[in-house]
């Protein structure tokens, strides 16, 4: 793409090479609703686009026109779709097209069409594109560490094109920067379950539990590692309730003062519902938190729900419902 | 395990997530604090839904949009739906001329994209009447962007037009199932992060194809319940910021769950038989007698010295909730409906018309649509069925704030949904 051309900003009607084309105006009917007051530049560019689209003209000038249209509105999926058809017909260099998309993406990192276009290009380029795509998403994530599209794209690249080698380390770096980044935790889960270089969830569980427990103890109010910990035992509740690290962790958090106890309590409740036999220390720790001493004859689950109704008042209805679901 | 020194060091160094979160919390709590400190008469005024202003803002959008809307040019059917649905929720209708123009525009619209088809169909259903409903042509659907939204929009459209069949449902259930994450919520694609928008779409689609029980509903409920934060509104993902639009995406999940037979609901039969609910255990005796002024008590969680949310507080919220101990406990919504209404009305509502993501952000039609939809969900969260009007205690602010009820599967106003069902059942 010749970027200098854009400096001229001559509209199609002002260019001799477009003189053979009759622009096609937008047909919204006589009195359209939600009418947008298009600027003349936009209206004219789209009128010419409609003409080449209708004629299915897949030429260099049509390609340039899609570029103009994209600059004016990167959200028009029809334009992107047609651009792809032209790229194929003209057998254009797709690495160059990636350069192009990268530039457009700078200011539009949350635009579905751009990411879709990128995915299409990377798929066509194959495994060789993996490195570049990982670098690109890393760049986007350095500015917006939770960008949903970027993460989605990154996962697609890993699964379709490869490049897993440094992914766990990358995840760790992001968590070092921000232990509350749930997207990074989610990515970590993705890696340990899907990476062909690692042994799978069960094989990774031991080390991951240690990692997660450390994260929780550093910030017990951080929901992400608590859910991640639970996820490590997905589909295996027996291991979940029998792992001493889990109940030890809960006990530790519950006996710390000035700490958020909500997730620890919720975890114990979850463990109980899967058959955990609570230790005396655990029971005592929960009882200490219960302002209502008359309910010491209640089941531990009941007591936990009562505590949470006060300690996590936003979810009072939820905890009452949980209590009603307890098998006494 | 890292030493205590390193741990406390990290705690002192606030992360980006924490900084962003505390900034929003501060802003929101200032609003709640200011609200709590003004006299009750002034509070009543601020809690009012600015109906006239909203309708004005919405109607203007239907008539004319500025050049900056060019970024939504491909999505004008969406603009149409957001605006028309918002107007319908407010119990208003557009004048005949605008209505004809809308129908005309929507039938001319090229809609190769599945999502815009959904928006167009819902717009026409919202407008209602023979002209709008006749103009809907039936489309066959082929694969577009493969993600959970595509599943929902395709199935929703097919269902509302009465052409949902096994062919369409085949494979979708497996796909959505694979999108439920370890957190409990549903993602846009397998492996991605659990997200409010996709959780709503995924659950709604599963319900439409009668496979909701294949999901791990317990973990889904747990995830979505924890998306309501101290700001009283909902966040879209764990450790992200509150946003008014999730009032519907997340709040709506509860509306869907409540109607599932597994939770004591009456289900979603396409032949919506009106169930005559005999007033059994839900009125006399079991209701807590409360001063209705408690409802307007601002939910103002305590903050510790560093301005962070203290975990051990007990805000007035627990007294502001109207607990209805029905026999099967089926009507009690699992989230804090009054808190959510508080966020919508005090933080998202703009006095000049329209709604926004959060204080400091600009209003837009998308947020107007989903804040109002979420508000409706809250108001009707304790209603047994669409025909029984909510108790005043379910509505934050004056009872005149009451909106029209929606059908949570499609997010169109109930009455219009039933009219469309009647219309298409004849085909």
Image (tube, coloured by chain):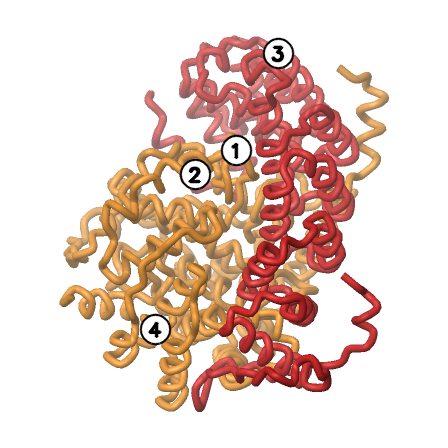
Question: Which of the labelled discs sits on residue A326, or is there none?
Answer: none
- First along the sequence among labels 1 and 4: 4
**Going 42% across and 53% down the picture, which residue do you hit?**
B252
The residue singled out by tag 4 in the image is: B124
The residue singled out by tag 2 in the image is: B221
**Going 55% across and 60% down the picture, which residue do you hit?**
A81
Image coordinates for residue B352, horizontal then vertical, percent = 60, 79
Above or below, comparing residue B76 to residue A168 in the picture: below
Above or below, comparing residue B64 to residue B22 in the picture: below
Image coordinates for residue B343, horizontal then vertical, percent = 56, 59
Nearer the observer, A1 or B153? A1
The residue singled out by tag 3 in the image is: A206
Letter of the chain shown orange in the rendering: B
Specify few, some or many for label 3: CA neighbours under 10 Å numbering under 14, 14-19, or 20 or more.
few
Alpha-carbon span between mark 2 and mark 4: 33 Å
Nearer the observer, B338 or A92? A92
User: Residue A174 is drawn in which quadrant?
Assistant: top right
* Label 4: element kind: helix
């Amino acid at each position: 793409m010749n970027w200098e051309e854009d400096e001229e900003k001559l509209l199609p009607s002002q260019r001799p090479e477009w003189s053979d084309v009759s622009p096609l105006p937008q047909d919204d009917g006589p009195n359209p609703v939600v009418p947008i007051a298009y600027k003349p530049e936009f209206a004219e560019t789209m009128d010419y686009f409609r003409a080449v689209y209708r004629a299915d003209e897949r030429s260099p000038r049509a390609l340039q026109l899609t570029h103009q249209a994209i600059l004016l509105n990167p959200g028009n999926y029809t334009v992107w779709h047609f651009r792809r058809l032209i790229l194929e017909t003209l057998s254009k260099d797709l690495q160059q097209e990636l350069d192009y998309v990268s530039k457009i993406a700078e200011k539009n990192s949350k635009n579905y069409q751009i990411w879709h276009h990128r995915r299409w290009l990377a798929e066509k380029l194959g495994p060789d594109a993996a490195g570049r795509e990982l670098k690109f998403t890393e760049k986007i994530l350095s500015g917006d560490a939770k960008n949903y599209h970027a993460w989605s794209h990154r996962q697609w690249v890993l699964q379709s094109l490869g490049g897993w080698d440094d992914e766990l380390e990358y995840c760790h770096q992001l968590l070092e920067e921000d232990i509350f980044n749930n997207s990074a935790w989610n990515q970590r889960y993705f890696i340990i379950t899907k990476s062909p270089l690692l042994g799978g969830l069960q094989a990774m569980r031991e080390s991951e539990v240690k990692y997660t427990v450390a994260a929780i103890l550093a910030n017990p109010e951080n929901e992400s590692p608590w859910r991640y910990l639970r996820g490590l035992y997905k589909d295996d509740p027996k291991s979940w309730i029998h792992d001493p690290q889990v109940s030890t962790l809960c006990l530790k958090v519950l006996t710390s003062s000035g700490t958020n106890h909500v997730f620890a309590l919720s975890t114990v409740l979850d463990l109980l519902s899967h058959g955990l036999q609570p230790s005396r220390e655990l029971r005592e720790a929960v009882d200490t938190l219960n302002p209502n001493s008359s309910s010491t004859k209640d089941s531990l689950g009941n007591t936990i729900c009562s505590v949470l109704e006060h300690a996590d008042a936003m979810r009072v209805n939820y905890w009452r419902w949980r209590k009603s679901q307890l098998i006494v | 395990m890292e030493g205590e020194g390193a741990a406390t060091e990290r705690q002192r160094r606030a992360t980006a997530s924490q900084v962003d979160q505390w900034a929003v919390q501060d802003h929101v709590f200032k609003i709640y604090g200011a609200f709590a400190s003004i006299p009750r008469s002034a509070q009543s005024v601020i809690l009012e839904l600015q109906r006239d202003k909203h309708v004005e803002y919405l109607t203007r959008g239907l008539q004319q949009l500025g050049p900056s809307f060019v970024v939504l040019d491909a999505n004008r059917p969406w603009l149409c739906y957001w605006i028309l649905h918002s107007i319908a929720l407010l119990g208003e209708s557009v004048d005949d001329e605008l209505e004809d123009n809308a129908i005309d525009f929507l039938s001319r619209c090229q809609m190769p994209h599945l999502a815009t088809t959904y928006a167009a169909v819902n717009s026409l259903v919202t407008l209602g009447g023979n002209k709008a409903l006749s103009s809907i042509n039936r489309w066959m659907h082929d694969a577009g962007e493969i993600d959970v939204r595509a599943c929902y929009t395709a199935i929703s459209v097919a269902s509302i037009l009465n052409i949902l069949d096994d062919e369409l449902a085949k494979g979708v259930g497996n796909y959505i199932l694979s999108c439920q994450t370890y957190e409990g919520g549903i993602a846009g694609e397998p492996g991605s992060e659990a997200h409010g928008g996709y959780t709503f779409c995924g659950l709604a689609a599963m319900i439409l194809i009668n496979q909701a029980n294949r999901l791990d509903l317990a973990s889904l409920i747990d995830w979505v319940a924890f998306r309501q934060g101290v700001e009283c509104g909902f966040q879209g993902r764990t450790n992200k910021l509150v946003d008014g639009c999730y009032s519907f995406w997340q709040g709506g999940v509860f509306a869907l769950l409540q109607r599932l037979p597994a939770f004591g609901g009456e289900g979603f039969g396409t032949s919506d038989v009106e169930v005559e609910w005999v007033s059994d255990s839900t009125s006399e005796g079991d209701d807590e007698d409360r001063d209705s002024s408690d409802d307007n008590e601002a939910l103002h969680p305590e903050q510790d010295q560093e301005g962070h949310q203290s975990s051990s507080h007990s805000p007035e919220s627990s007294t502001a909730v109207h607990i209805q101990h029905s026999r099967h406990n089926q009507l009690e919504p699992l989230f804090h409906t009054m808190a959510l209404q508080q966020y919508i009305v005090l933080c998202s509502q703009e006095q000049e018309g329209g709604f926004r993501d959060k204080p400091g952000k600009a209003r837009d039609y998308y947020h107007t649509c989903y804040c109002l939809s979420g508000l409706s969900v809250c108001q009707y969260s304790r209603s047994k069925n669409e025909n029984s009007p909510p108790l005043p205690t379910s509505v934050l602010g004056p009872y005149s704030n009451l909106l029209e009820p929606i059908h949570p599967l499609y997010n169109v106003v109930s009455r219009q949904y039933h009219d469309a069902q009647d219309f298409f059942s004849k085909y």
